[in-house]
Amino acid sequence: MIDLRSDTVTKPTEAMRQAAFDAPVGDDVYEEDPTVKKLESATAEMLGKEAALFVTSGTQGNQIAVLTHCRPGQEVILESNAHLFVYEGASMSAFAGVQPRTIAGNHGAMDPDDVRAAIRPEDIHFPETGLICLENTHNKAGGKVVPLENMQKIYEVARQHRIPVHLDGARLFNASVASGVSLKRYAEQTDTVQVCLSKGLGAPMGSMIAGSAEFIQRARKWRKRLGGGLRQVGMVAAPGMVALTEMVDRLAEDHIHARTLADGLGRVKGLAIEEDVETNIILVNVEQTGHDATSFLSELEKEGIKAVKFGPHTVRFVTHYGVSGTDIRTVIEKMEARFG
């Protein structure tokens, strides 16, 4: 089976497995796990922040950021198809007691003027704007890289209004590799950032939040409240170190595979590529094949291919290190044979 549903389906490398086996560990709730401390220090350095915190998932990292930045009754500005809004179970409302204020973006990027207009004025009738959230790369926009200039302009608006900015950088490593912009340059346009180790970097689990030392100390308490205070967690942090040191540059290969797949699928009768491919995500409209996304995926399964529904007639394919160039050619050939 060729699994193109997500880069979360990757399996840990042999180096990661060995690192987990060899990892020195301690009780991380007591901040005594040397492997976790090493990972947190390395992440903070890569992102140019004072401190970082290991969390169990990207969703947990994002929600800890919202909980730490905001008070109940406030409002969070974010793009209308942001992961924080679409795919995290309304957790910002359920846990933090805040409401989202969404802005329609262009390929995942909000217009800074729209952000400025969405910030609430002082009025007894309105919630206070507590946070602005960005996402890079943008999942629902097809893995688009949000331009650095766009982030800079939004951050300037935020600073003028003394509102913090959080970046959902689940695939920020993909953005950096694709654009040539360093992780630090992106992170400079934010107060806090979350990055995933378990997507394209291939670690078995875990994400990191980075920000000021004071923010991370408060975030640590929210992690505990959410049940994310783990004990000998160095055994899963060690693969994260391998992810940071060995798996970043090879993301370029995933991007090449994604463009190859998009070019091939674009030539298949009835298929249309919805967005220019910039990183490792391909969105394919299947309506002209006579299928909706659900029935199309059933046809793919018969061919030994997995993808995921992303809309009524949209199917998402994601390349990752578990998918080879040969696999990509096989997918194209099978699609050509089935759909002409």
Image (spheres, grey):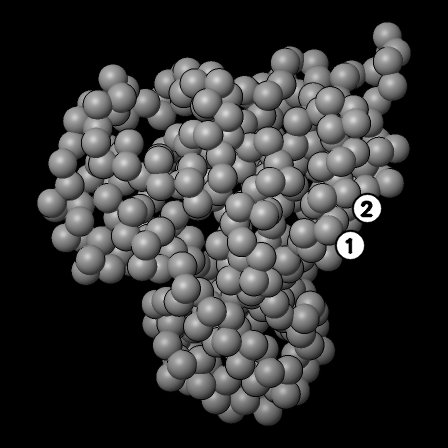
* Residues tagged 1 and 2 counted as in contact (Cβ below 8 A): yes
Q: Against 76, is 263 above or below?
A: below
At label 2, the amino acid type is Asp
- Disc 1 crowd, CA 10 A, few/some/many (<14, 14-19, 20+): few
Residue 195 visible (yes or no): yes
Q: Quadrant of residue 37?
A: top left
Q: Is residue 340 above or below residue 310?
A: below
Q: Look at label 1 and name its amino acid.
A: Asn
Q: Find disc 2 in the rendering and name its residue.
A: 111
- Place of residue 316 in the rendered image (x, y in percent of width and height, measured from the top left): 56, 64
Horizontal relation, residue 236 to residue 286: left or right: left
Q: Is residue 289 above or below residue 223?
A: below
Q: Which residue lies furthest to the left in this view?
A: 22
Q: Residue 136 carries which label?
A: none
Quarter of the image where the C terminus is located: bottom right
For marks 1 and 2, give the one nearer the viewer: 2
Q: Where is residue 313 in the image (x, y as percent from the top left)?
A: 67, 65
- Image location (x, y in percent) of residue 288: 71, 78
Residue at x-position 69% and y-position 55%: 147
Q: Which residue is drawn at 51% across and 62% down?
A: 177
Image spot of residue 64 (x, y percent): 50, 26
Q: Nearer the viewer, residue 317 or 184?
A: 184
Mark 1 lies on a secondary structure that is loop
Q: Residue tagged by mark 1?
A: 106
* Quarter of the view holding residue 295: bottom right
Res 217 quadrant in image: top left
For the question of whether residue 95 can be seen, the reply is: no
Q: Residue at x 49, y 34 (%)?
A: 49
Q: Toward the viewer: 67 or 112? A: 112
